[in-house]
Amino acid sequence: MSTTDTTAGPAEPLPEQFQTDRAFLGHPRGLGILAHVEGWVGFSYYGMQSLLVLYMTSYLLTPGHIDHIVGFGAFRAVLAVLYGHNSGQALAANISALYGSLTFATPLLGAFIADRFLGRTRSIVVGACLMTLGHFLMAFDVSFVLAFLCLATGTGMTVLKAQVGGLYAPGDHRRDEAFQIYSLALQIAVIAAPIVCGFLGERVAWRWGFGAAGVGMTIGLAVYLSNLRWMPPDPLIVREGQAERPKLNAREWRSVGVLLLLVPILAVAFIGNNEIFNAYLLWGKANFQLVFFGQTMPVSWLISLDAIVSVVTTLLVVFFWRWWASRRKEPDEIVKIASFTFIAALAPLALAAASIQAAGGHKVGLAWGLAFHIINDIGFSGTYPIGMAMFSRVAPPAVNATVLSCFTFCVSLSYMLIGKLAALLGTMPDSAFWALHAGLIAIAGVLLFICARVFKRTLAPATEADL
């Protein structure tokens, strides 16, 4: 085994087979493979996510079980630094928030490793193996902390998004739609994951739910390994003493700087969507009428409801921009993102109105939840996939995977912010709680429009910016 130091070099020219391949819905067949794999990754992630808080509050963190977790004392000390000293349901919420944050933060480190050392393909394989191991370890009390670390680290190394961008030449206008199709596969997986894993975990045994997530991850790994020939070439890995990676020029450094500036703004823009896994579930459990035909619907199934709505809204957004492009010039990506951020700001207002109706302990119908999901998912479908495409296009090739992972870091920061905001639930009127979210998202929309004006030449496609 060689111990020679390696770094990631410049990307190879895109082979002609990818430029002419339209076998999958007018896109390279590699997009279909990556979407399929991402679907299984999403199934495992969201299946586990739908169980995590319930598992901890109902079983793991109860007396007689919490004492069996190896390394939990040190783990809890870290949580205390981030969120304060908590126990019971609050502690479970802290752990869930940290998990969500880490799974979107570690891709930055994973992409750096992929760009500089392992290459994207090997990084994805290692990450998928760690995720699979983590899901199976989650079934046992004693290995919870180890499972947590395996899952967070493994998720960070599965840099599938960078390979999606690698299927297209810089000027290929199919890129935006490719990321929307890729995101659609994830949304479909989210529909099934809470239903399957949630039912097995809550009605059969917790370990069955986590095991189902592990099986899904295993299938995704098998699909990826059996279709490597359709993957785009990795950036060249050059050994020490060979030609060094080209240095970034002034325009490329400016592009990186602008993208990094957008990270905290987008984090605020995403808080309404990401509350679905935190305060929204707590508020929904307390305020929604969930009894149907004498049976109480698991509150975690609201995640599946959101995914169903999200599939429809993603398709609507795709077809909307196709319709728009057939009649007039499309706006730049940053303008699209800013516009749909204002739509997303309306979603928490639906919950604010429902909170007024629920005052005094009254249960409200799921129509309020459906309104929230429809508005939120229209906004999110017009921001997240297009933002991913913009980061992929604007980021310099030499650091593309690393900079693209900064986009997922937006979600990590959003989860950290949510961890702070969720603590306000119950300390103020629920209507004010959700109105606060709407106001913060609207402020993010204003800042995005300002960035669209100030940094137009940097963020616009090169063919236009260089005129």
Image: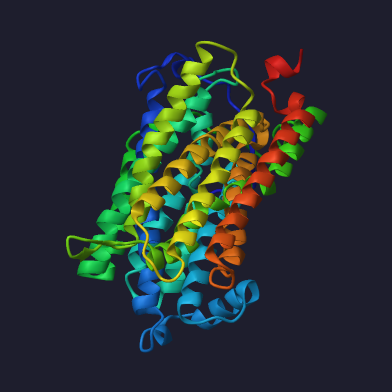
Q: Position of residue 321 (x, y in %)?
A: 50, 22
- Frontmost residue, 313 versus 247: 313
- Frontmost residue, 342 versus 226: 342
Quarter of the figure with residue 437: bottom right
Q: Residue at x 41, y 83 (%)?
A: 66
Q: Position of residue 115 (x, y in %)?
A: 60, 41
- Frontmost residue, 113 versus 61: 61
Question: For the view shown, which residue lies furthest in the left direction?
Answer: 293
Q: Say above or below: 293 vs 360.
A: above
Q: Say above or below: 294 vs 232.
A: below
In the drawing, does residue 344 fall left or right of residue 306?
right
Q: Residue at x 46, y 32 (%)?
A: 180
In the drawing, does residue 299 fall left or right of residue 403?
left
Q: Is residue 224 visible?
A: no
Q: Position of residue 144 (x, y in %)?
A: 41, 73
Q: Residue at x 56, y 50 (%)?
A: 107
Quarter of the figure with residue 257: top right
Q: Position of residue 57 (x, y in %)?
A: 39, 76
In the drawing, does residue 99 fall left or right of residue 449?
left
Number of marks in the rendered image: 0
Q: Say above or below: 110 vs 299.
A: above
Q: Residue at x 40, y 52 (%)?
A: 369
